Image (cartoon, coloured by chain):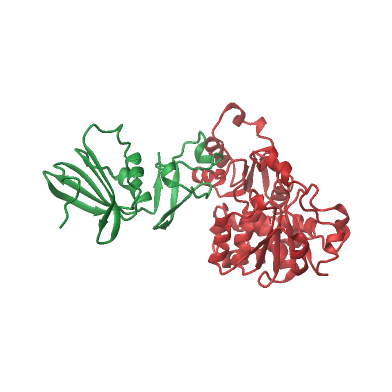
Chain colours: A green, B red
Amino acid sequence: MKKLKITPIKNGTVIDHITPGVAVKVLHILKIPESTSSVVSVAMNVQSRMGKKDIVKVENRELDPKEVDKISLIAPKATINIIRNFEVAEKHKVQLPDEVIGIVKCSNPTCISNSKEPVQSRFLIVDKDPPRIKCYYCEREPEDIAERIT
Amino acid sequence: MDFKNRDVISIKDFSKGEINYILNYAKKMVPYAKGEKRTNILQDRILSSLFFEPSTRTRLSFESAMNRLGGRVIGFADPSATSQKKGESLADSIRMADSYSDAIVIRHPQEGAARLSAEFAEAPVLNAGDGAGQHPTQCLLDLFTIVTERKKIKGNQILLLGDLKYGRTVHSLAYALSLFGADLTFVSPESLKMPKEVINECREFGVEPNSTSNLEKAIREADVLYVTRIQKERFPDAEEYNRVVGTYKVDNDLLEQAKENLIIMHPLPRVIEIDPEVDNTPHALYFKQAFNGVPVRMALLSLILGGKPL
């Protein structure tokens, strides 16, 4: 079996089965490189049994649920592996919730959620794969979800 | 069917059965709306009428509807005379109206304002138009007009004409007409075509709308022509508006090619898109359509505020 070109990590998170070409957007969501000084490895278009995929490995960081929700919006088939001392301590698939609150900014400049009102942005999931979301307030669908994630 | 305390934010919040129920109840309201019969079923109930954007028909017909039912109306038609001018949030204005009244009607220039209002009010909120978003009571009165004139909606060839991109009423109407199985043709300049997501919604109900820019050809088969104004205030820039304004005009010359029993509707106000010479033809239904706002809004207010059934 061929070896992956990036090596295992001791502690951190491996985000596997990312839609090919989307790894860069995952980095953007995780605010990498600004948010970490640890090693981050990215593999794109890796051949697997289920076709091509991207992989992101972030050392010394475990993702919080909000970050996982964000990733599910752009890579609905991704799996999150939490690595502790070279072992997979937790493994789960991202799951798109029925709605996402406070993580996507509405693309409609005249949507009430973009004004000074005391509410967080709120989006309902229209389709899970590929993900489509609709603003709860103005009912518009952003064309590029990754661009709108805050 | 229970409508008590329901918010009316989008036509999509209602099933086909519920819409039919409202339309049937509206039919019973017609003699009361005309003042031929009297009722006090909403006596001592108060409606807040909050119009943050100009309106003639929607505001007056809501207020007429509440008065015809024996209720009372408080509110404003000009937000410059309110605390909004001092920078108050919509959420706070709604909290106030909620504590002063039994139901709230709101028109606001921003999309989603009515949905947000419903979150902050205990009382039911009725959306009287939120920017380029939803206008469900207009949609209901449009459906009521078609049903009253054509007996049913299904099987009619309905042309939606004008600004189909920014037009508030046509998006909800296309959805609702598809729900009832109408045949749809969208007629607009290329730059003001119906958005893709609206067309996809029609398809979900098995309706495949035709799209064209040729009104002369499309009008020959039409049973209903729904004309909309090209709304200057919705355009992001004046140049785009100037390019398309005046593209279509409905006049007697055009109507020579139409079916004898074609009905012409328009949410009003109209500017130049329908020539006044059409007003005197049997095709013109837009003024009756505007009146229909009263019985439809009476039906809604009565159902939502739990008025004794008439």
- Left or right of B72 in this view: A126: left
Where's residue B227, x and y in %?
Answer: 74, 56
In this view, the residue in front, B77 or A91, is A91
Expressed as whole percent of the image width and height from the top left, the position of residue B209 reads: 63, 65
Tell me the quarter of the picture where residue B298 sits: bottom right
Instruction: Work out whether residue B305 can be spotted.
Output: no
B88 to the left or right of A133: right
In the image, taking residue B209 as reference, residue B220 lies left or right, namely: right
Whether A81 is drawn above or below B31: the answer is: above
Q: How many marks?
A: 0
Q: Residue at x 83, y 63 (%)?
A: B255
Relative to A75, say whether A120 is above or below: above
Query: In the rendering, at what x and y percent does residue B275 appear?
Result: 84, 53
Instruction: Name the image quarter holding the N terminus of chain B.
Output: bottom right
Residue occupying image coordinates x 52% and y 49% = A140
- Image position of A9 (left or right of B226): left
Q: Quadrant of the C terminus of chain B?
A: bottom right
Res B281 visible: yes
Image quadrant where residue B283 sits:
bottom right
Q: Find residue B144 and report its image quarter.
A: bottom right
What residue is drawn where x is 31% and y is 39%?
A30
Residue extending farthest to the top is B86
Nearer the observer, B162 or A134:
B162
Q: Return the residue nearer the eye: B239 or B255.
A: B239
Please state which of residues B217 and B228 is positioned toward the viewer in this rendering.
Answer: B217
Q: Residue at x 29, y 54 (%)?
A: A53
